[in-house]
């Protein structure tokens, strides 16, 4: 059983004892804390709620809505929805905030409350700490019976979201329609099974092979869109009857693409390709991704005469940096595209529309388009430490050891070696240092990661 309380939301497994997992008691407590915070920080008294299709979604949804009503908050219930759809609905409906019921890429036994402010963006570090403190103190004041909140269902939010995407100047529906793309969609039996086909049809795609698009919440495979979890869609594409594959995670904020021959386009390259298209159309512009994302985005940005900046890991940090640098497109290397022209949130749907426009106008196949980008490989590793080891001290020693190299310490320690880099981050929940290394070959990236792991072990031994 697990319950993880973070500034951006509450995540846990369903079942077990209160305080040890995401039980009904925990759902009510943290919803009450968020609702209390929202009322204190907004002139509005409405909260938007939406969920993915996971098995516990209906139960959690009822608990959340009932709790908000109990605080005297009116609720707009989007039902089965997507994270970006809820993000857009919050400001559109002039709400005090939003709650998305999804554990993103986590397996079906997990669920979570993702918390949004009145802009439809993830709450800040300071706001998150206030919510957690309210929950800890159980400082809730529930409404009298005549002041309970009301519930309104909204089944049109997704269509409004899609309509807004179609209206974007850089989305060319006619170009997509003319290509008559044949597409396979894997939506892991969640709400993407509704949203992605609806978007594709609106874009003029008529040949859509649906794989795991029934929103039952009984995920057909591990829902994180990594190559090892996408073998089924890859086999369909290997037969050569389709132009590309589209994969989204359960709440549709991450986008992975599959080439026409069943090979992976690469989750890191979703943002790279879309940024290349946007920057090319705008004649340049700035970009942002997190420190653990591929250098290819920086290369593409500089090719178009723009400036690239790195943010700490986490969507709220990426959005903050994007606003600071007047970024035209940004996101995370996990397939998360943030396009400010639409809204400040990771959005697989706008990513699909922009990518298909890019693919149509390029005249290339998926494999040829992928080959046009710099080729980098990221090696992901971790080193487990004993609880008595001071992780911060280890990272400080690594920074000192590589002081002659460019070092970034806004989120752990990132060390650059010409076009190679390594990023060290400590886990917030366990004594682990995560090590990401990137180079132009898998072998070199692995070698760099192992060299850094060796350095960390040296430092630990010296301290012992």
Image (tube, rainbow, N blue to C red):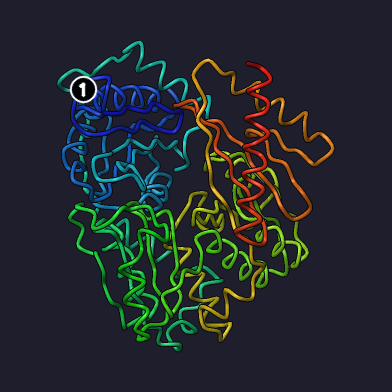
Residue 411 in the image, given as x and y percentages of width and height = 63, 34
* Lateral position of residue 149 relative to residue 362, left or right: left
Task: Residue at 52%, 57% (x, y): give it.
Answer: 337
Residue 178 in the image, given as x and y percentages of width and height = 45, 89
What number of labels is visible? Answer: 1
Task: Residue at 51%, 69% (x, y): give it.
Answer: 354
Q: 125 or 2: which is nearer to us?
A: 2
Quadrant position of residue 164: bottom left
SS at mark 1?
Answer: helix
User: Which residue was labeled with disc 1?
Assistant: 25
Quadrant position of residue 433: top right
Task: Residue at 33%, 42% (x, y): give it.
Answer: 103
- Please determine whether, in this image, residue 45 is positioned above or below residue 361: above
Alpha-carbon neighbours of circle 1 within 10 Å: few (<14), some, or many (≥20)? Answer: some
Q: Quadrant of the N terminus?
A: top left
The extreme right residue here reads: 404
Residue 402 in the image, given as x and y percentages of width and height = 78, 35
Q: 87 or 147: which is nearer to us?
A: 87
Task: Residue at 69%, 48% (x, y): give it.
Answer: 421
- Please determine whether, in this image, residue 53 is positioned above or below residue 399: below
* Lateral position of residue 336 relative to residue 251, left or right: right
Q: Quadrant of the C terminus?
A: top right
Q: 364 or 116: which is nearer to us?
A: 364
Residue 167 in the image, given as x and y percentages of width and height = 47, 69
* Lateral position of residue 72 relative to residue 397, left or right: left
Quadrant position of residue 424: top right
């Amino acid at each position: 059983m697990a319950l993880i309380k973070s500034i951006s939301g509450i995540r846990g497994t369903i079942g077990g004892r209160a305080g040890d997992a995401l039980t009904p008691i925990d759902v009510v407590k943290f919803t009450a804390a968020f609702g209390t915070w929202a009322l204190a920080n907004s002139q509005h008294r409405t909260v938007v709620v939406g969920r993915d299709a996971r098995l516990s979604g209906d139960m959690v949804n009822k608990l959340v809505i009932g709790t908000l009503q109990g605080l005297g908050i009116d609720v707009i219930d989007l039902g089965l929805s997507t994270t970006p759809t809820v993000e857009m609905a919050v400001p559109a409906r002039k709400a005090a905030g939003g709650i998305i019921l999804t554990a993103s890429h986590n397996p079906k036994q997990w669920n979570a409350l993702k918390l949004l402010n009145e802009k439809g963006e993830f709450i800040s570090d300071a706001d998150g700490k206030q919510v957690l403190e309210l929950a800890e103190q159980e400082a809730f004041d529930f409404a009298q019976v005549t002041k309970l909140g009301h519930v309104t269902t909204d089944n049109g939010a997704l269509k409004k979201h899609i309509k807004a995407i179609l209206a974007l100047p850089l989305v060319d529906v006619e170009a997509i329609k003319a290509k008559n793309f044949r597409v396979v969609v894997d939506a892991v039996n969640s709400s993407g099974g509704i949203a992605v086909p609806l978007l594709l049809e609106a874009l003029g795609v008529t040949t859509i092979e649906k794989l795991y698009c029934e929103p039952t919440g009984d995920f057909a495979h591990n829902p994180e869109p990594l190559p090892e979890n996408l073998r089924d869609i890859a086999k369909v594409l290997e037969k050569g009857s389709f132009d590309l594959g589209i994969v989204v995670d359960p709440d549709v904020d991450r986008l992975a693409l599959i080439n026409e021959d069943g090979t992976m386009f690469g989750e890191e390259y979703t943002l790279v390709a879309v940024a290349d298209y946007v920057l090319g159309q705008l004649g340049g512009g700035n970009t942002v991704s997190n420190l653990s994302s591929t250098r290819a985005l920086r290369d593409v940005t500089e090719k178009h005469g723009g400036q690239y900046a790195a943010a700490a890991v986490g969507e709220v940090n990426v959005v903050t940096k994007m606003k600071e640098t007047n970024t035209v497109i940004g996101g995370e290397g996990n397939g998360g595209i943030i396009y400010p022209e639409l809204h400040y949130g990771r959005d697989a749907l706008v990513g699909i529309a922009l990518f298909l426009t890019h693919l149509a106008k390029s005249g290339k196949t998926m494999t040829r388009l992928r080959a046009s980008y710099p080729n980098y490989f990221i090696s992901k590793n971790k080193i487990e430490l004993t609880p008595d080891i001071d992780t911060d001290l280890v990272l400080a020693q690594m920074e000192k050891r590589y002081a002659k190299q460019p070092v970034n310490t806004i989120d752990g320690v990132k060390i650059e070696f010409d076009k190679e880099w390594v990023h060290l981050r400590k886990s917030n929940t366990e004594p682990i240092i995560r090590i990401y290394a990137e180079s132009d070959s898998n072998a070199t990236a692995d070698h760099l990661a192992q060299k850094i792991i060796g350095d960390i072990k040296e430092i630990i031994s010296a301290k012992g």
